[in-house]
Amino acid sequence: MTGLNRKKTLVALLALAMAPLAQADSGYSVSVGGEYTRGDYGTGSNVSLLSLPVKLEYVDERYAWSIGVPYLWVSGPGDVVVSGSGMGRLSPTNTRTTSRTDSGVGDITASATLRLWEEGPRRPWAALTAKVKFGTADEASRLGTGENDYALQLELARQAVYGHVGYKVLGDPAGIEYDNIWYGGVGVDFPVGREVDGGVELYAEQEALSGIDGKRELTFYLGQQMERATRITGHLMMGLSDASPDWGAGVTLRFDL
C-alpha cells in the first residue's frame, strides 16, 4: 500500500486522523461510522463516549480537503469536557462534579492537505495539513469547549512506515487556560490478505493543562476494500495515560462518490 493510501486508511478509523491524499481514487467520498470509548481519565469514575461521525472528503493528485461532524453521547462525571480537535478527547475541569448523560451534535472539523512531493529513492512521501476544530458543540452540556482549535502538521511515509508531527493551538474556554501543544504519531501498515490490510499506530501529545498527563494511545486497525467504491475499517484502541480512554473500538464505512 502506498503512503497516499495509508493516509486514507488512517482517516477512516481515527479521531486523530490525518487528512489524506489518494493516489488511485481521486474525487469525493463520504464516511460514516461509530466509535465507543471508556475510561476514568484520572477522575476515579468511568466516562463513556459514543461518537457517530459523518465526513465529506475531496481528494485530488496534489491536494485534499474534508469537513466532518459527529453526534455524541457522553455519560459520566460532570467535570469532564469533550475537547481537542478529535472525537472523544476528554480533559478534566473543576466546574461540574455530579454525574451526567448528555448528547448532541459535536464540533465541526475541517482540514486541507497539500502534497509536498512523492516518495523517491532517497526521500519519503510528504504532505502538509492544516486543521480547524470549530467550537460549535454545546458548551453548557460539556460536548465541546465552545472555542476554536487550530493545528498544522507534517506527514511523512516511506514504504510501510508512516508518521506525522504537528503543533496545535487550543482555544481557552471560560475559567480554563489550555497550553498549546506538540503532537505526533508513528505507525506501520502491512498486507493481511487480498484487499485487506492492517496496521498499528502509536500517538502521543503534550499535556494541555498543568498536572494532567498528555495523551498516549496505541491503535490497531484492519481494513478491507469491499467493492470498487466501498471500504470498511475497524479499529481497537488502548490508552497509555490518564488523559486517554482506557480502551476504545470503532468501525468506519467509506463510500466513493
Image (cartoon, rainbow, N blue to C red):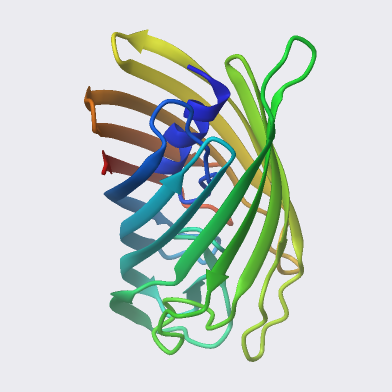
Please identify the residue farthest to the left as the structure is shown: 227
**What's the residue at 40%, 84% (across, down)?**
138
How many callouts does the rendering have?
0
**What's the residue at 35%, 47% (across, down)?**
28
Q: Is residue 192 visible?
A: yes
The quadrant where residue 242 appears? bottom right
Please identify the residue farthest to the right as the structure is shown: 122
- The quarter of the picture where the C terminus appears is top left
Residue sitting nearer the eye, 171 or 205:
171
Give residue 22's position: percent from left, percent from top.
47, 33
Looking at the image, residue 101 sits to the left or right of residue 58; the answer is left
Give residue 202's position: percent from left, percent from top.
59, 34
Q: Is residue 241 visible?
A: no
**What's the residue at 36%, 35% (across, down)?**
235
Give residue 165's position: percent from left, percent from top.
72, 43
The vertical placement of 35 against 48, above or below, is above
The vertical placement of 198 against 4, above or below, is above
Residue sitting nearer the eye, 144 or 11:
11
Residue sitting nearer the eye, 236 or 129:
129
Give residue 123's position: percent from left, percent from top.
77, 19
The quadrant where residue 147 appears? bottom right
The vertical placement of 126 against 177, above or below, is above
The vertical placement of 26 against 135, above or below, is above
The quadrant where residue 159 appears? top right
Looking at the image, residue 254 sits to the left or right of residue 63; the answer is left
